[in-house]
Each structure stands twice: as structure tokens, then as C-alpha cells.
Image: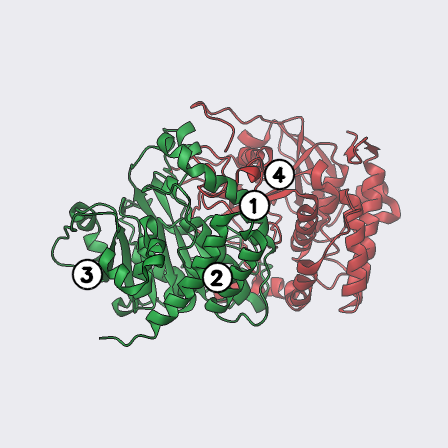
Amino acid sequence: MSSSSSSTIRPTPLLKDELDIVIPTIRNLDFLEMWRPFFQPYHLIIVQDGDPSKIIKVPEGFDYELYNRNDINKILGPKSSCISFKDSACRCFGYMVSKKKYIFTIDDDCFVAKDPSGNDINALEQHIKNLLSPSTPFFFNTLYDPYREGADFVRGYPFSLREGVPTAVSHGLWLNIPDYDAPTQLVKPRERNTRFVDAVLTIPKGTLFPMCGMNLAFDRELIGPAMYFGLMGDGQPIGRYDDMWAGWCIKVICDHLGLGVKTGLPYIWHSKASNPFVNLKKEYKGIYWQEELIPFFQGATLPKECTTVQSCYKELSKQVKAKLGKIDDYFNKLADAMLTWIEAWDELNPSMQLANGIERLVV
Amino acid sequence: MSQVTIDRNEIDIVIAAFRSDLTSFLEEWRPIISRFHLIIVQDPDLKEGLKIPNGFDVDVYTKSDIDKLVSASHASMFSGYACRYFGYLVSKRKYIVSIDDDCSPAKDNNGDVVDIVTQHITNLKTPATPLFFNTLYDPYRKGSDFVRGYPFSLRSGVPCVLSCGLWLNLADFDAPTQSLKPELRNSRYVDAVLTVPKNSLMPMSGINIAFDRETVGPAILPALKLAKEGKVRWETMEDVWCGLVVKVVCDHLQLGVKTGIPYVWRNERGSAIDSLKKEWQGVKLMEELIPFFQTLKLSQDAVTAEDCVMEMAVAIKKGMGSKHPELANAAGNMVEWVKIWKEVGSRVLI
């Protein structure tokens, strides 16, 4: 059963020195004003997409580092080819240069949402709660996250599974503009998500999901190297599948390594609906390719010798090349880019092999 | 999505009675269930006749009905909480909604009374999506849909055959949990229903369920009896066992199981601490059952729920029967259930 049996609720640690907020942007960072009460204690990593000569103003009072395309090219040299241009997928550069244990990433059109009582939702605090409590991927708990206050494991839940596993990813949701694909947006342009579902739950082992990068947090030490957002945008045949691709990769790896992925709270308020016709052009190939990608990821197995995220990811890239290369040459390039990403990650994050064989990142 | 029709001719409401005076229980539920046919099965150990208020279309079954239909050696299959399965057996309708007799109607976050029948039947009449997780939960609900990245070929879903509801106030916690946290009450109304993904097992709670009897009735079965089973939910495993069986069957036959709304309000009954002793056997068993059920594979020849149950019974007897006599018994009960199901099903209506 869950740990606390006392009636007092322990406050959630701020983790301000252990968490970076990564924000991709091409326009401006005005949205940060609304988040100021919640984000100000934290270090921001801004990844500026598009024209590097444009000056993006960061609101006063935030502690940040900002990288534009020139910076990315300088830091990574030829390896910068793995970082997308003209697509929010470039955000994963921020994951790579961070020196913290946790990452929270959010889009610049996402604002503070209100819960049903009318209170502002501190999305970051909820993500931290999700990451700091275990996941339960091996057996479904019908009362959702058993570690939340007021919840627990239900009758019939095996006691040997009640310790759970470490949580690697916390996937938040969106009120107002839902994350629909282009065809759905075209059919339902006025649909808004107004339903506040007061739950967090673990996505079971063996089940894939569509991971959205708009409101996402993860333990960089546990899963960071697998959070590559792929080749999208300029010069690429596809867009709006960056977070999807990362989500399928991390889920296969988390399932293999015995790590958990949670979804549900927190909600943010998604204000901007992107143009569905533009989206359709970006997604078009993905809609077809995904029919082959899903069976690929569903059937992907990793050898037991792969005990680190990097080795899992490299193995996955081999399988991508072998099995998906025939769909389109794009996947050969993507497989290569996955390896480039890992090389760049390891260069920027020299690791230390511990006695038990688990690589720890030296901060 | 088109509106789901709630047709009273398709639905039976099955309730197991553990106390003789059902007046307050039925009065509470009257606005929601009075237009449906009720099947009330009296706990065979309950000696007094049932007191049922007027205005219900109800059939009552007692110990003598059970004894008439099944042989004496198998009548014990329908004792205690498992007596409700007799109701499933004799029903002639497509859908069953079944709740415990210590539940009252709940209220949702808007203060409206939850109509469990409408919600359960809606869950059953809209597809389930076990092959890929939708982060906005049931995509067929009004105001929801499949999210970006959900494969298009999987958007027609599969038939949903089991709807597992939840409980406010006294949630379905086990005896150790409730004993350690006597004040713990579930006050969180989670406004979602979602499909339990394929290959993921879950603990089914019989307190508040509905299912498609036509498709999966043979797999909703009374099989596992604990040695010291009692008259409170903390002292039974029949529903948890049933849930493991039916999920394996559904996964094999490409059918879906949903969980979430509707909620019932569950009232106090029994003592968690007193129940601790009785539940222990079941708790120990679960530790071995889970790995067994997780790896259980059925053959391609199993194409109906009956086929699946028969294959599972053989596998259970072979894999676990010698180590656990109660599981060998359960396997035997499963075979017997399918036999009785077929017999009853083939009888002509009088």
C-alpha cells in the first residue's frame, strides 16, 4: 500500500536546483509572464528556432540560457544535423545541454489552467509529484495512481507489486484546444476539451501511447538519451511526429528497463489552434507511415544485454534501419540521426560507470 | 457519434440479496432501475423471505431454484457473493448490470445523480480501444476524440463487453489497507472511462459491473472459493478471479474492457480488521496467479468465450492444480459452469 498513513500531506519539494525548464520558441516568450509565480525559481533553457538573427526577449527576472541555431551549430559541429530546424523538435537540444536531473518542457502557447474549483494549476508541481512517486505498469489499478493522496491500491492488487517502479516520464494534458491531428481538426474545428479528469495513471507495460511534447516532464537521468525528437521541419518530409516518435521509443525502452510512464494531470491551457491545412501537409506522410511504425514498435524487443538507455537506443536505431528503411529512405536518415544524437549526448554528458553497471550522468 | 439507445428489453439488473429487507435499497434506486427487469437472487444462507416494495418488475430466485437447476454437488458454486451468477445464468437478455446491495446512487461533480444503467450501457455500446492508449481516455465520449498520433486503422475499436464501474465513499480496498487507514474514503470523482489495454490485467470488482451476456457471459463465472469465504467483500475473491479470466478471454478474442464511470456510493458494512484473517489466503494466491495469467496463451481454435474458458480450465488445472487444490476446484467449476450455461441456454422459454 502507499507509504503515508498520517493525515498530514508532505509538501512537494521545489527541486529548483534539480530541474530545468526547456522551451522551444520562434516568436516570443510573453507566455512566461503568466507562469512567473510557478517558473521563476527555476533555470530556463530557451531553444530559439528559426532565424538566429532575430532577438527573442526573455521577460525580466528569469534565470536562463538561450540557444539559437548558430549556437547549436557551434556546440555540436557536424552533429548538429540531428537537431531539427523550423520545428519545435529542436527542443531536444535543450535536454542534451541541461545539467539537471529533471526536465519540464512546455510550448509557448500553453498557459496556466484552472481546476474545477477555479484555482490556478501549478503544472510543474504536479509533474514533480508524478515523477517522485512510483509507477505501476505491471498491473492496472482501477483507482488510478495509488500514491496520490486519498487513493490506494484496490482489493486484488498483488502486494508484491505495490512498491512500483521508478517513474521516468510524466505526460500532462491540455484544456481548451485539444491535441488533435489535422483531419480531426478539419472535421471538428470548434471542439474544445472542457473535461477536467482528476486522475494520473500509469500506462501499462506493453502498451504504446501518443506522447505529446506540449506539457511533458521526465527524469533525464533515467531516460534522457531516448528523448530524441527526430528529424522534422525544414528539409524533412514530415512534421508533427517528433514527440510521437520519441514517445514510442521511450515507451519501448521504459518497458524494457522496468521504468514507468504516467499520464493525466497536470492540465495546462492550450490557447492556439495551429492551421489544420498546414498541419495536414506536415502530417500527411506520417498518417500512412504510422500504420507500419506502430506494429514495428509494438513488436520491438531489446536484448537483455541492453541495460543502459544509450545501448537500448542504439539497438533500436539498428532495428529502425533494418525494418523501416524499406518504407522510405527517411528512416535510414533517421536511424543515423539517432546514433548521431547519442554520440552528441555522450560527448556533452560524460558518464561514469558505476559498479552495478548503470551509467550515471556526471553533473 | 450517434446517441446510444437504452432499450429495456435488452437489459437485466441482477442483484444478490444478503439481507431480507430490500425496501430502502430498492427505494433509493427506484428512479434509476424501476423501468428495467430485475433479477434478485437470494443468498442461499438467508433464511427469511425477501421484502420487496411494489412497482418493480422483478423475478426472485432462492436456494430452491438453484437446487432445481444445478446438481447438489454444484449448488455450492452459487453460495455467498457468487449467488448473483445464478442471475446471470437464468437471464434471457443481452446486457447485465449488477451491483452489490450495500450501494446507493452517487452524485457526479455537478451534483446530478449518476444513472449507472445509462452509463454502463453506453460504455458497452461504444467501442473499446485496447490496442493503443488514447490519452484523452474514451474517444467516443461527447467532447472527446482520438488524439494526434493515434493510428487511423485502430480508430474503429473493438466491441466492449465488460464495463467496470467505481465507488465513492467506501472504495473497494482490501482488508489490510482499510484496517490501516480506517478513515480513508474515496471522494475523488474521476470523470473518465477508459479501455484497459490489451495484455494488461486488472482487479475486477463485482460491486458495480455490467457486461454483454451474449458475448462473454460464459466467462463471467463463479469459480474460486476461498476456504473461509464470508459475507463481506473483504472476504471474497470470486470477482477478482473472474476478472482475470475474462480479461484473458477478451484479449484473446479481441474484445474490450472499460473501467471508470459510472460511480456508485458504497456504504459501510463489516469490519476490515475482523476480515483480515479470512482474506489472507486469497492475498497469497494472487501473487502466483498474476504471473500465471500474464503468460497464459490460448490456441487459435478458441473462438468463443466457452472455448476460451474450457482451454483455460485445462491450463489452470495442469499448471497450478496440484500445488493449490482450491485452484484445481476452480478449474473444475469453470468446466461445470460452461456445461450448465450451455444446458440452460438450450432450454425453451416457458
Front in this rendered view, residue A181 or A72: A181
Residue projecting furthest to the right: A78
Identify the residue position indicated by label 3 in the image: B58
Q: CA distance from mark 2 to mark 4?
A: 27 Å
Q: Name the quadrant containing residue B95.
A: bottom left
Mark nearer the viewer, 1 or 4: 1
Do the dots labelled 1 and 3 sit on one chain? yes
Identify the residue position indicated by label 2 in the image: B256
Q: Name the quadrant containing residue B211.
A: bottom left
Do the dots labelled 1 and 2 sit on one chain? yes
Observer able to see residue A124? yes
Identify the residue position indicated by label 1 in the image: B288
Q: CA distance from mark 1 to mark 2?
A: 25 Å
In the image, residue A101 lies at what x, y percent? 69, 32
Give the letter of the chain under mark 2: B
The tag earlier along the polypeptide, 1 or 3, is: 3
The tag earlier along the polypeptide, 1 or 2, is: 2
| Amino acid type, callout 3 | Val
Chain shown in red: A
Do the dots labelled 1 and 4 sit on one chain? no
| Amino acid type, callout 4 | Val
Q: CA distance from mark 1 to mark 3?
A: 41 Å
Do the dots labelled 4 and 3 sit on one chain? no
Q: CA distance from mark 3 to mark 2?
A: 30 Å
Give the letter of the chain under mark 4: A
Q: CA distance from mark 4 to mark 3?
A: 49 Å
Residue projecting furthest to the bottom: B348
| Amino acid type, callout 1 | Glu
In the image, residue A69 lies at what x, y percent? 78, 46
Chain shown in green: B
In the image, residue B189 lies at what x, y percent? 38, 43
